[in-house]
């Protein structure tokens, strides 16, 4: 009988330790994931856009803003054209038409 009590005690202690370790490892995994996400640097491409053969400026990958036909300004803004583009549009450096005033990667955003 004494042996049974000792074995039961060892089993209960082992179960408690296993549960405590599981809870701790889950907390540690969450803390590690949070730390990793918080310290992960943004991915930035250092590759500069190249000139497209179709005449579209590569700084504006989702629309075709032609080089050599004058300046582009945001439609509804205070710019004087002669060309206007409605936004928002994605902008990559070097942004030759100056459409991304706050340098966040988007041009012609609503103010």
Image: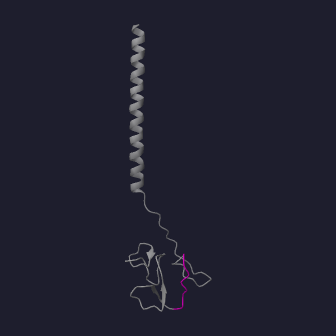
Residue 53 placed where, x, y %?
A: 62, 82
Q: Quadrant of residue 2?
A: top left
Residue 15 placed where, x, y %?
A: 42, 25
Please identify the residue farthest to the top as the structure is shown: 1
Here the colouring is: one colour
Query: Image height check: is 64 above or below 40?
Result: below
Q: Residue shown at 41%/24% (left/top)?
A: 14
36 is within the stretch colored magenta: no
Q: Residue shown at 43%/60% (left/top)?
A: 41
Please identify the residue farthest to the front as the structure is shown: 76
Please state the extent of the stretch shown in magenta in the rendering.
62-69
Q: Quadrant of residue 30?
A: top left
User: Closest to the observer: 42 or 18?
Assistant: 18
Is 52 positioned to the left or the right of 79 in the image?
right
Q: Residue shown at 42%/15% (left/top)?
A: 7
Point out the image quarter for the N terminus. Answer: top left
Point out the image quarter for the C terminus. Answer: bottom left
Residue 57 placed where, x, y %?
A: 54, 82
Query: Image height check: is 38 above or below 101?
Result: above
Q: Quadrant of residue 22?
A: top left
User: Closest to the observer: 19 or 110?
Assistant: 110
Which secondary structure class fits the magenta region best?
A: loop
Counting every numbered tag in the picture gives 0
Q: Residue shown at 39%/55% (left/top)?
A: 38
User: Closest to the observer: 9 or 47?
Assistant: 9
Please identify the residue farthest to the right as the structure is shown: 53
Residue 109 placed where, x, y %?
A: 42, 76
């Amino acid at each position: 009988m004494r042996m049974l009590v000792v074995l039961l005690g060892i089993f209960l202690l082992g179960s408690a330790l296993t549960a405590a370790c599981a809870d701790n490892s889950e907390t540690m995994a969450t803390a590690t994931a949070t730390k990793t996400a918080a310290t992960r640097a943004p991915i930035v491409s250092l590759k500069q856009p190249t000139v497209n053969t179709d005449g579209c400026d590569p700084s504006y990958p989702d629309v075709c803003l032609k080089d050599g036909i004058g300046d582009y300004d945001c439609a509804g803004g205070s710019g004087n054209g002669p060309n206007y583009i409605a936004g928002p549009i994605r902008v990559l450096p070097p942004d030759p038409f100056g459409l991304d005033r706050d340098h966040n990667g988007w041009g012609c955003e609503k103010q």
